[in-house]
Amino acid sequence: MPISGFPEWMPPQRMIEQRVIDRARATFELYGYAPLETRSVEPLDTLLSKGETSKEVYLLSRLQAEEGQKSDDQLGLHFDLTVPFARFVTENAGKLQFPFKRYQIQKVWRGERPQEGRYREFLQADIDVVNRGTLPFHYDTEMPLVIGDVLSGLPLPKARIQVNNRKVCEGFYRGLGLEDTAQVLRVVDKLDKIGAQKVIDQLIETAGASQKQAEACLQLAEISSEDGSFADAVRKLGVQDPLLDEGLDELLQVVETARELNPGLVVAELKIARGLDYYTGTVYETQLEGYERFGSVCSGGRYENLATVGNEKFPGVGISIGVSRMLGVLFGQNALGVSRSVPTCVVVALPNEELRRTCDRTAAALRRRGIPAEVAPTAAKFGKQIQYADKRGIPYVWFPGREGEPDTVKDIRSGEQVEADATTWEAPAADLYPVISGS
RNA sequence: GUGGUCGUAGCUCAGCUGGUAGAGCACCGGGUUGUGGUCCCGGGGGUCGCGGGUUCAAGUCCCGUCGAUCACCCCA
């Protein structure tokens, strides 16, 4: 029986997921991010030290645990890859070279109610850069570019990375005289869902805003642009605050850099600002065109204070692809497919059991040259053996030649059958491995 | 964690006001004595998510539970 929130996919889906992982890994490494894997478990107080997300943490307990176990030696499964990474950095600061760029592709766990695209166990592909003291801002501009490269190499709907800066929002709200900036953000973020009037109502009711303040917040939230024009639009609202200016300048850099290097990828969207509560500046959220209602498939941001050792700070910026969510929703709409359900490229037909050794040698010769091959399970009629391949989407069936005659290989899609030698035959590059495609 | 909707064969679903389970597709076999996909014929397969209750009788009504999904919360 399935367990709620812990999805298990079939081999075709897993093949697609592995392709995504391969692509992410290759791209991350192209940008110089070093591989890392951290343990899945952290002391509870490490997980909770920043932010109060306690209810979503899965705790680890032994069946034979002592009765009165203290909460400070409780272990919890990590709910993201950034917090464990921050812990790792502070623990190993002396052995690392800074700025430190690393990627992690691992499962994370959150105890929320599952829905389509929301799981309790899911895979994230995460990159972060941290430095001692201060981290140059240009890394904030790199994050969306890396993600753009990962996603554009896959048959996925077009991705739009929405960027904002918490300094803009906080500076603006503060300049406006509003205290509970976090609550303002939460309300403003619902704009698309509940509409302008309800946002204003809720700001007045839950965030202590006046009608005028609420309207100003709404005006800010409605600003969006693919170029630097958002900054002028914000300034026209007439709110003054040093933090606001700082945020606008940073956001401008992210947007303009992306516009030059990958036009159409990034958009400044001043209503998005959620994500985990340790973000202090740039924040990213990513939607796939046509799948907006499923939320962000790739989020992250800048964190100034997540990691500290003594009075030394390790600020960072990172972004992480929600691989399970992204694939889960695409699978749900049948928007992704794979050319076959197994890796096999060639099935070697087995005329009779006496010839199994011969057929094994044929398959071995193919494998030696990198062609995935298997011998048919039983010496059934050739029609059955072709069906075995066809059902799995395997493109080729290999027929051993009789009594000194040459072998032949048949492309079962076209029916074309030609003489072939297992030590020299090449599969067309497009057929060698399963191919994933969008639809 | 709170609330709503849903849960019949591998898949898509039918099953009226309770009377003891069906179709299409898929699958298996044969027609087709070692080269598939079409066509024809035949066949297997269901503790009606699970557990309890009401009833002479429950797929159908009630309660609980598990799972899916939606909203809230939160977020990948």
Image (cartoon, coloured by chain):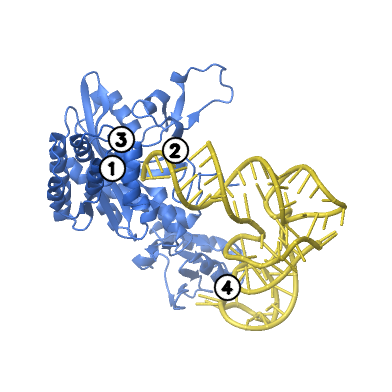
Res A337 → quadrant: bottom left
Q: Nearer the viewer, residue A396 or A341?
A: A341
Query: Which three-letter amino acid code belongs to the residue tagged 3?
Result: Gly
Q: Residues at marks 4 and 1, common chain? A: yes
Q: Which chain is yellow?
A: B
- Tell me the amino acid under the disc marked 1: Ala
Q: Secondary structure at mark 3?
A: loop
Residue type, mark 4 in image = Phe
Q: Which residue is mark 4?
A: A382
Question: In the rendered view of the protein, which quadrant contains the C terminus of chain A?
Answer: bottom left
Measuring from the top left, give residue A43's x and y in whole percent. 41, 24
Which colour is chain A painted? blue
Q: Nearer the viewer, residue A251 or A100?
A: A251
The numbered mark, 2 or 3, whose residue comes first in the sequence reads 2
Numbered disc 3: what chain? A
Q: Chain of mark 2?
A: A
> Circle 2 is placed at which residue position?
A109
Separation of residues labelled 3 and 1 (CA atoms): 19 Å
Q: Position of residue B1 (x, y in %)?
A: 53, 36
